[in-house]
Amino acid sequence: MSLGKRLRQLRRQRKWSQEQVARQIGVTRSAYSHYEINSRQPVYDTICKLSVLFEVSIDYLINPDIEDVEPVKTKILLQLWQAMDEVDKDHTLNMMAHVVKQSTAEEY
């Protein structure tokens, strides 16, 4: 899914107008409209603002291969991560690395 389609989808899910989104990220409605129709690409700073506004990762916004369930998973993971202390974060990273290593080894 293109960036423009993804932005339109996220905006419509929240029942926001283009004007409301544009105001919140500090651009004109016209500029935002161009983002949705893919005739103009937002600068990095604007992509960051859109990511925060829509509560999704930057990867989700710009990577057409990421599935539509990504925002929910990302938000949940972030909330869980923020609730952990440093020891739990280290333990979690080690477990995740182990799972990834195992799953990639099984592919070969």
Image: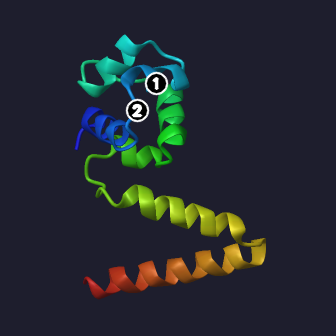
Q: Which mark is residue 16?
A: 2
* Callout 1: SS: helix
The image quadrant where one finds the C terminus is: bottom left
Rendering quarter of residue 80: bottom right
Q: Which residue is mark 1?
A: 20
Q: Nearer the viewer, residue 16 or 88?
A: 16
The image shows residue 20, relative to residue 7, as above or below, that is above
Left/right placement of residue 22 relative to residue 52 reads: left
Residue 21: where, in percent of width, then height?
45, 27
- Residue shown at 30%/34% (left/top)? 8
Residue 54: where, in percent of width, then height?
47, 42
Left/right placement of residue 94 relative to residue 22 reads: right
The image shows residue 15, relative to residue 87, as above or below, that is above
Rounded to the nearest angstrom, the CA distance separating label 2 from label 1 is 6 Å
Q: Nearer the viewer, residue 64 or 11?
A: 11
Left/right placement of residue 33 relative to residue 86 reads: left
Amino acid carrying mark 1 in the image: Gln
